[in-house]
Image: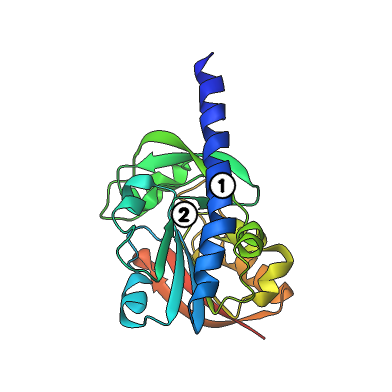
Amino acid sequence: MGASSRRDDASTFVRKVHRRALRETFGRWARSRSYRRIWIDVGAHEGETTFPYAAADPSLLVYAFEPNLNAASRIMGRLRNYVVLPIAIAEKDGSAELQLNAYEQSSSLLPADEAGVKRWVTEQEFKVVGSVTVPTMRLDTFLNGAAIESVDFLKVDAQGLDLEVVKSAGDRLGDVAKLQLEATTVAYRQYEGAPGKSVIVEYMQSKGFRLAAEEIQSHGQEANLTFLRA
C-alpha cells in the first residue's frame, strides 16, 4: 500500500470516529445538562477568547474547534463545559492539508500569499514549516449531528477562511444570534484568496446580519467584526 493510500485510509478513519463521537457522545452530553447558552469557537487555539468565559460560567457550553492537535491537546479535558474538537470547519466534509506555521496561531488551510507576507507588518515569524492532513466538517453538519438548535455566539478565527466557515452553516446560519469574524482591511493578504472586509460585510448583510462593532488589530491590517442578527 502506498503512502498516499495510507493517508487516505487514516483520514477516512479519523472522520468516521469524529462523526460518530459527535452524534453519540457530544449531542447526548449537551442535552443531559442544563446549559443556558451555547457558543462555538472556530480556530480556538488555546481558548484565548472563549475559555475564560466557560471557566467563569458553568451554564455556558463551548464547542472549541482547533485542527492543530498540538494546540488542541493543551486545552482538552480542562473543563466539562469546554468541548475541544480537533477538526477544521470548512465548506466540505472530508479532509484537508493544514499548513503549519512557525507562529502556531497562523497555521491555515490556505497557502500563504508570498507577496502579501512580505508586506505584512508583524512581530511574529510567519513561515510555513510543514503540513498535516486534518479532518474537515461543515458547520451545519456539526449542528445537526450534535442536535444543537441555536447558537448564542459564533467566534471565527480561521486564518483567511472565516467567510468559508460562515458559509458552511448553510441554512443554519439563521440559528446563530451573534458572530465575530476576522477580516483583512488592507489590499495585501497573508493567505491566498482570503476575502477582505467589504466582501464579508456584504455577505453578512445579505444573510440578515448587521455590523455591530469593529475592533482594529494587527497594526491596522485586520479587524474583528461583530455581527448581530437583524
- Mark nearest the camera among 1 and 2 is 1
- Mark 2, Cα crowd under 10 Å, few <14 / some 14-19 / many 20+, is some
Residue 201 location, quadrant: bottom right
Residue 215 location, quadrant: bottom left
Q: Residue at x 59, y 63 (%)?
A: 146
Q: Nearer the viewer, residue 36 or 51?
A: 36
**Amino acid type of the residue tagged 2 in the rendering:** Gln
Residue 105 position in % (x across, y down)? 35, 53
Residue 162 position in % (x across, y down)? 55, 60
Q: Residue at x 43, y 79 (%)?
A: 60
Relative to 21, residue 200 above or below: below
**Amino acid type of the residue tagged 1 in the rendering:** Thr
Taking the image as drawn, is residue 67 in sight?
Answer: yes
- The residue that mark 2 highlights is 159
| Residue 188 in the figure: left or right of residue 68 | right
Q: Which mark is residue 97?
A: none
Colour scheme in the image?
A: rainbow
Q: Mark 1 vs mark 2: which is more N-terminal?
A: 1
- The residue that mark 1 highlights is 136
Residue 222 position in % (x across, y down)? 44, 65
Q: Quadrant of the C terminus?
A: bottom right
Taking the image as drawn, is residue 89 in sight?
Answer: no
Q: Residue furthest top?
A: 1
